[in-house]
Amino acid sequence: MDWFGASDYWLTRLVFQRALAAVYLVAFLTAVLQFRPLIGRRGMLPVPRFVERVSFKRAPSLFQWHYSDRFFALGAWAGCAVSAALLAGLDSLLPLWGGMLLWLVPWVLYLSIVNVGQTWYSFGWESLLLEVGFLAVFLGNDEVAPPVVVLFLLRWILFRVEFGAGLIKMRGDACWRELTCLDHHHETQPMPGPLSWFFHHLPKPLHRVEVAANHVTQLVVPFLLFTPQPVATAAASLMILTQVWLVLSGNFSWLNWITIVLALSAVRFPADPPDVPGAPLWYAVVVLTVAVSLLGLSYRPVRNMLSRRQVMNRSFDPLHLVNTYGAFGSVSRVRYEVVVEGTADDVPRADSGWLEYEFKGKPGDPRRWPRQFAPYHLRLDWLMWFAALSPAYADPWFGTLVERLLENDRATLKLLRRSPFPPDAPPRYVRARLFRYRYTTWRELRETGACWERTYVRDFLPPTRLAGPVQRP
């Protein structure tokens, strides 16, 4: 079946599969290192409590049938092991059906995690990894040429990621239409990176160029993905260049990296294709059946993209097979941060010895320069950014976070960069205050060494102890 496979994309498939396996590995490692204080049995949003009220049909997951922290860790570590095996190319050493089953394993495991992850796993890159990971199951190995229809569906995902993000920007915030959003974005994004301060201080005319280039890349270039080569390769390469720019300017988990992986599927690398037999009939039937089903499921994402009430990052089925994407439909003009502090004093006063908890990624100490964490995802730090936007985002979990800090809970403290209290001497009280943060100027940076300047706004949470909140005297 020469019409079924695209043998000149064999190197494209190889690069795509290894890169996707690397993203899978980061995702599972993130789960291994963070799940206990977030969704573990004593976590802020425990899985057992979630599965009691949400059915398997609404959230299919292995952990619907059984949950323990040990079982979850086993599943996450298994995901790491299989991802590493795929990264090493084990699927190429197996028969076609064996390679497909091996690619199915991380998809099932990560779907099981996402569907019980609740708020901590509500980001668009989770669904994107699952949608891409599902298609990877049907991309084949060295026994067959890459199926044309699967390559097309990968480009279809990339089109929806980019075009959906472009539409939500144009509809969502006037600053995108006025080319002024990047006057604010690098300062107010969820988690700045080590170069974000410098990006923010680029000349404003260059910011206008950045926004205009973004519109071209997201609203025009995606259509070129479906044109003949080498135009499609040029379009995908431009998208990769844009994503690298975003990688340099902030910490966006693996969103940029999985988008780069997707774009690689549209790049045709110059290489002589190997001789491979035609695809077996059973494989062609499976691939074509899946393709037709996914195209049918695309109806709702397309309708959403065309709607004036477009929403972003929404899954339309519990398996996350076909989703809608988008990012930064609106851009904050002012940055707020929740600063969490504790004291060992028996009576909490304004002049008590309040000591600040340091988070790994989110801004805290104005003199501490942001670090690069992406593609690793600091889930608590990201949700703290949302909490600063509105306390409603923090309602389900912030109280438990404070309780764990008052207990000096070891697992919770591992989510932080540093606790100001020794392990055997927890704080008597914990409070949270809201600050406005802004980047310092070049002169302020030289004079103070601080990249941030912060101003107290209001209390976020009054001094609280394990028995409950108290009034400040």
Image: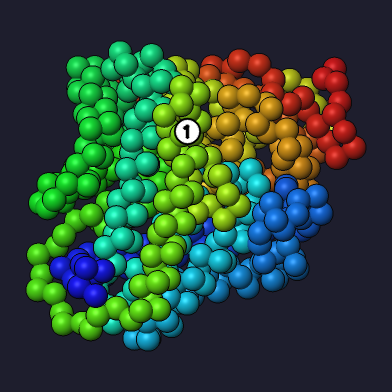
Q: Which residue is at 61% across, 15% downward? A: 457
**Is residue 377 visible to us here?**
no
Q: Where 197 falls versus 65 (above or below)? A: above
Does residue 429 appear anywhere in the picture?
yes
* Residue at the image position 82 percent from the left and 20 percent from the top: 472
Q: Position of residue 248 (x, y in %)?
A: 29, 41
Kind of residue sitting beneath label 1: Asn
Residue 223 pos. (x, y %)? 23, 39
Quarter of the figure with the N terminus: bottom left
- In the image, 127: left or right of 318? left
Q: Which residue is mark 1?
A: 304
What is the quadrant of residue 108 in the picture? bottom right
Q: Position of residue 204 (x, y in %)?
A: 24, 17
Q: Secondary structure at mark 1?
A: helix
User: Is the residue marked by circle 1 packed among few (<14), some (14-19), or many (20+) residues within 10 Å?
Assistant: some
Question: Of residues 203 and 165, which is closer to you in this image?
Answer: 165
User: Is 441 placed left or right of 452 in the picture?
Assistant: left
Residue 257: image location, x then y, percent: 35, 51
The answer to whether residue 174 is above or below residue 337 is above
